[in-house]
Image: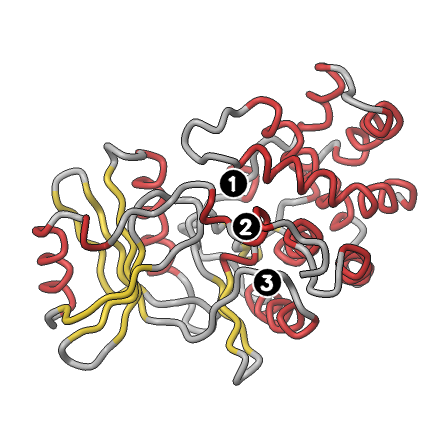
Amino acid sequence: MGGTSALTQHTGLFTPRTAWSDSPVPLRAAVSEALGSAIVGHRDLHGGMSPGPAAALELADGRRVFAKAISSEVRAHNHMLLHRESAVLDALPKTVPAARRLATVEWGSWVALVTTWVDGTFNGPWTDESIKAVVRACRIVGEHRAPNVLRPVVERIFDFDGWERVLALGPADDWEAEYAGRAAEVVAGWERWTSGDALVHRDLRADNTAVDAKTGSATLLDWAYAAAGSPWLDLAQLAADIVGTGHIHGPQVATDRAYALIQMLPVDAARFVVAQSGVWRIRAATIPDTVMPMISTWRRERVQALRPLVTRLIRSL
């Protein structure tokens, strides 16, 4: 797998999902009623960063749909994100490569979101073909003006002062002693250079994409962080994820593919990748693994994987 660790390939290790059959019977009955067809079978799905169930549901009328659910008593943050994603999906233009919302159902502390089924799966490592497919999808997204209901991207970006905070804490090694200060300078003013009115997915990772090998097309999933911002932003986040998740031909190829992608974008895309590495660095140091086991390790791995690319970008800015 080209040097990619098992952890970075399988984000389901963060927080194992409960089974669909373990969700409340009344919730499942309400989903069936909202869809107008009985659920006759299901297949549990894994991965992502929510502890709630996710499943492919088979309906009596022949449809297959995707459903995910969470209780606010399990994790209030994910409960809020499902509500937010429901609203975002309703606002997206039909020409955006996204699943379509079919139903949002609440029962007690639980909420379930049901969408159309999307062909294709992808959790990494990246290949040249999957990169091309997701690049096309991101470009289509960025050609759309953000719906008015979406907030500015500054409200969907967190911890972009990571390198400044690393400096305050004290560099952890020789690389940080040499580059953290310059990284903080490169990222400065991010509120300005990430802004715009283009539609931005803002949570671009391998496990938030579905690539259909038959058609060579990609669909972007999990739209809770969608915002209005710079049209290149998702492509910059893709570049960071190519290195963080890894390429099937190894880390050097991953770095080369990411650098080539960044070179096709405005210079601020390079700043974004530097900032993203700072996000992972400071979160690994300051946020415990209480909700998602192993996520700090995942973040540290990504910081290390990105160092060759970040070094190259800093030197060129």
For disc 1, the marked residue is 156
Amino acid on which disc 3 is placed: Gly
| Residues at marks 3 and 2, CA–CA distance in whole angstroms | 11 Å
Residue shown at the point (27%, 34%) measured from the top left: 74
**Residue 168 x/y as whole percent:** 72, 15
Quarter holding residue 1:
bottom right
How packed mark 2 is, by other alpha carbons closer than 10 Å (few <14, some 14-19, many 20 or more), is many
Residue shown at the point (23%, 40%) measured from the top left: 71
Pick the front one: 167 or 54: 54
| Residues at marks 3 and 1, CA–CA distance in whole angstroms | 16 Å
| Residues at marks 2 and 1, CA–CA distance in whole angstroms | 7 Å
Residue shown at the point (34%, 67%) measured from the top left: 100
How packed mark 1 is, by other alpha carbons closer than 10 Å (few <14, some 14-19, many 20 or more), is some
Pick the front one: 118 or 268: 118
- Numbered tag placed on residue 142 in the rendering: 3
The tag earlier along the polypeptide, 3 or 1, is 3
Pick the front one: 140 or 306: 306
The tag earlier along the polypeptide, 3 or 2, is 3
Q: Could you tell me if the residues under marks 3 and 2 are in contact, i.e. CB atoms within 8 Å?
A: no
Q: Could you tell me if the residues under marks 2 and 1 are in contact, i.e. CB atoms within 8 Å?
A: yes
**Residue 104 x/y as whole percent:** 22, 55
Q: For the residue labelled by badge 3, is the local secondary structure a helix, a strand or a loop?
A: helix
Nearer the viewer's eye, disc 3 or disc 2? 2
Amino acid on which disc 1 is placed: Arg
For disc 2, the marked residue is 202
**Residue 282 x/y as whole percent:** 64, 27
